[in-house]
Image (tube, rainbow, N blue to C red):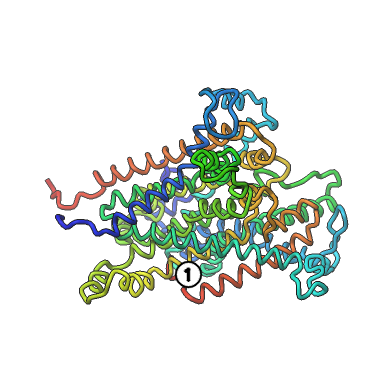
Amino acid sequence: MSEEVLQQASPGLIPGSGTARAAKPTRLSPSFVSWLQAGPMMLVFLAFFLIPLVFVVIVSFWDYNEYQLLPAFSGRGYTDTFEGCIAQLPDLCTIGKTYLKTLKLCFMVWAITLFIGFWVAYFLAFHVKSKTWQMGLSLLCTIPFWTSNVIRMIAWIPLLGRNGLVNSGLVKTGVINHPLEWLLFSEFSVVLALVHLFTFFMVVPIFNSMIRIDKSLIEAAYDAGASGFQTLVNVVIPLAKPGIVIGSIFVITIVMGDFITIGVMGGQQIAAAGKIIETRVNALQFPAAAANAVILLIITFLIITMMSRIVDIKKEL
Amino acid sequence: MKEGRPRSFYVLAVFFAAYVLFLYGPMIAIYVLSFQGPQGGLTFPMNGVSTFWIAKLFQGTGIVDLGAAFRRSLLLGIIVMIVTVVLSVAAGMAFRRKFRAQSILFYSAIASLIVPSIITSLGISLEFRIIDDLIKAHWNENFETSMGLLTSGLGAHLTWTLPFGLLIMFAIFNRFDPRLEEAARDLGATPWQTFRHVVLPIILPSVIGIGLFGFTLSWDELARSSQAIGAVNTLPLDLQGLTTTVTNPDIYALGTVISAVSFTVIALALGTIHVLNKRQAAKGSDAGQGLV
């Protein structure tokens, strides 16, 4: 069927057909075919990612008033953002405090997801011997990733709320007299939810690196008299490093830009780098929002550059 | 295989089980709680068992028009899925040869994946605002907006799903044997025939995986939609709106319904992949079967 359509459209493409025998089949040049194949995706990224980024940078230098954008050069987006940063020295200004807080959250989530992700991946890669089990258990870790993040956040409410399972359990057993307030809508619940949502991004790349490690290297280490710990530190971790770095880049960039988890799980009370942008947009202060986006972009980019010094990402994919 | 498992196996098995419980436990809790009795609240214990809250959702007595949001999200999800599959497979094929701009496309995809969603979302919204202003200034003063579900919204979702699609294609072709195509070519197949009858059947299970990513990531997408979707809301945006206002199990019921769609799609996709893999294993190779 498809060949018939193709033949009608361009008979020359089908060798073996009468016309094609007569004339030499017109082949499209390989580079033209590549453009045809890759072009559409490139266009999507151009229209919805690269050009928008350029607009973010341009608009960050525009002026604004209460209700509209003014396309004239101005540094107001930035000066508003850094307001008081020099006057208040040595105290940190609002933006400084917010970034410090975001980095702190980022570090906590990174450390926890790395720990959990490493051992989950280790278990899957080295201890689960059967391919079927390996597939099944990896799938078990992946399925939540295909479900809604907001639902996975809300899911903590019946557990951590004032009258939630944890509090009522603790009160009943007499460990505490009054329900703990810091379990929900707090920094604790933000970190918990971020770990819950994004450990997956750590597990996958680390597992990918570990599965490629030649098992005989580990046996060789044991045969040479290395202890389990020595093998881990000197063989497994160095070889799993690319996965660790890629996973870390994912987790850190997600947490740096997050505003939804921090909003929902922090009861809209915790300031963060991503939330500033959201607040500015809601106030229709687009240049200020764009200026904050540029700052966030630069910081994220610096972190990634530092981390990709350690490993060549392109080689690992 | 008489060798016993090391102690570390048991320690890590328990750790893994705890992680899985941590992943699924809370989700299961809200699925159960959405079947609260009519008097039930947001927490355990259950106050009777009923489908009251789920039924209420479908009657549309809620604050927002969830039915419309549901249809919008479904439409967008299906379109994103189709576009993601087609563009990813095409681009994946292109990456098997060297071509100019190859590394630009590669780094665009990676950057699109890791640049914080709020920045991409803001950028798309600025882009469309500026387009709107231009149209108003030069062509049509009464023009409303070019932002919408299937313009800026679709684009925003694609910046999130396409990188996954492309990376999956890389993984596929990393273990694809090019000799199969050479054989097809030697037998006189055209490039299209080679793709249609040799390459596509082999990669089909993974292509369905790309579709699964495309649909589910769009169905649940929130961060990129937040600024770029225009005037209408998708289902996850409505759900997020409810988190600050709702005090009864409405929200769990909605969560359960959204998840039910996700799980149906996941089950369908995984089932199809399983059947295709089985069929490949059964019919794929006639090696060693001789000529008789």
Q: Is residue B155 visible?
A: no
**Mark 1 sits on what residue?**
A313
Residue type marked 1: Ile
Tell me what residue is drawn at x 60 percent, y 24 percent.
Answer: B39
Q: What element carries label 1?
A: helix
Q: Which chain carries label 1?
A: A
Q: Is residue A138 left or right of residue B233?
A: left
Tell me what residue is drawn at x 85 percent, y 43 percent.
Answer: B142
Q: In which quarter of the image is the N terminus of chain B?
A: bottom left
Q: Residue A83, relative to residue A272: is it above or below? A: below
Q: In this view, does B189 lie to the left or right of A200?
A: left
Image location (x, y in percent) of residue B121: 67, 54
Tell me what residue is drawn at x 74 percent, y 62 percent.
Answer: A290
Image location (x, y in percent) of residue B132: 78, 51
Image location (x, y in percent) of residue B163: 52, 57
Q: Is residue A104 left or right of residue A205?
A: right
Q: Residue A12, relative to residue A30: is it above or below? A: above
Name of the residue lying farthest toward the left:
B292
Foreground: B145 or A274?
Answer: A274
